[in-house]
Image (cartoon, rainbow, N blue to C red):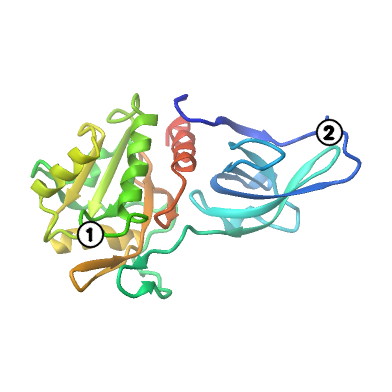
Amino acid sequence: MNGAGTRHVVRGVILVLASLQWGCAHRYAVRGLVVAKVPGQNALVISHDEIPNFMGAMTMSFLVQRQESVEDFQPGDQVEFQLVVGRDSSYARRIRLSAGEPITSALTGRLPALPASPEQLAVGEPVVDCKLVDQDSRLVRLAEWRGKLVVMNFIYTRCPLAQVCPLQAANFSRLQKRFSQELGKKLMLLSVSLDPQYDTPEVLTRYAEAWHAKPEGWRFLTGSASQVAAVTRQFGIVYWPEEGSLTHTSGTAVLGADGRLKAFVEGPSYNAERLGDLIVHFLEDGS
């Protein structure tokens, strides 16, 4: 397992704090990202933020209160919950989705709620192979990265909002450093442009250089409008022109070595460390 992250990652361990000497239960608000679910134990493996006055950020399993089910959650879901810690045991309750900040339009503010695409894949479904063009003007297919874990985001180089596309690129840059040993061998990062008319291979080459992207492991992809749409529809990404800019929804897809969707993280403002912990989980599982 790559040790470049700042967290101590613990998998498959149920949180039991029998050594605590408190006489009553303590409750903590927790935010994190679902890495995996353990239905047989009604538990979720979660990469969570620091819990003030209790523990640092890490990845571990949390038993879920009996009245609640883990079946409603998928890897990549961003969640909030209450952690109840007693003398002999602990459990999570009141778990709810807590998606990242929605994309905002540069002109009109926050986007309205958008209907799901009928072509949007569910976790576990196979990704349909598509043709695109990389920054070297080479025709590529998604299928050529089968056998590797693929993490894919959707950006465009002229994006004016620092908290959207540039933030996603910065997060990929952090992942590139954390997984320097796996990059290109077990892991691929793909950034698909939503603005293929402007984002030619030459433009993407300059953008990749600005982010010091290593071409063996982080590729920037474009193509015709129909080729890009064939990819984005599978992940529910919606975008449209708006007075010289683009308004778009956002998400980061994780594709397994078998070509199936393993996880989808909504929004642009995910925590790069959390996504990295999700990647660690899938790399260790060989999926």
User: Which residue is at a point 71% across and 36% down the rendered structure image?
Assistant: 15
The residue that label 2 is drawn on is: 20
- Residue under label 1, please give it: 194
How many C-alpha atoms fall within 10 Å of the one at disc 1: few (<14), some, or many (≥20)?
many
| Nearest the eye: 39 or 112 | 112
Query: Residue 125 at x, y = what percent?
Result: 40, 53
Quadrant assignment for the C terminus = top left
Label 2: element kind:
loop
Q: As shown in the figure, which amino acid type bears the numbered disc 1? A: Leu
Question: Dots 1 and 2: beta carbons under 8 Å?
Answer: no
Q: Residue at x 44, y 26 (%)?
A: 4
Point out which mark residue 278 bears: none
The disc, 1 or 2, on the residue closer to the chain's N-terminal end is 2
Q: Residues within 10 Å of mark 2 (few under 14, many from 20)?
A: few
Which residue corresponds to the image point at 20% horizontal and 73% vertical from the top-left?
Answer: 243
Q: Amino acid at mark 2?
A: Leu
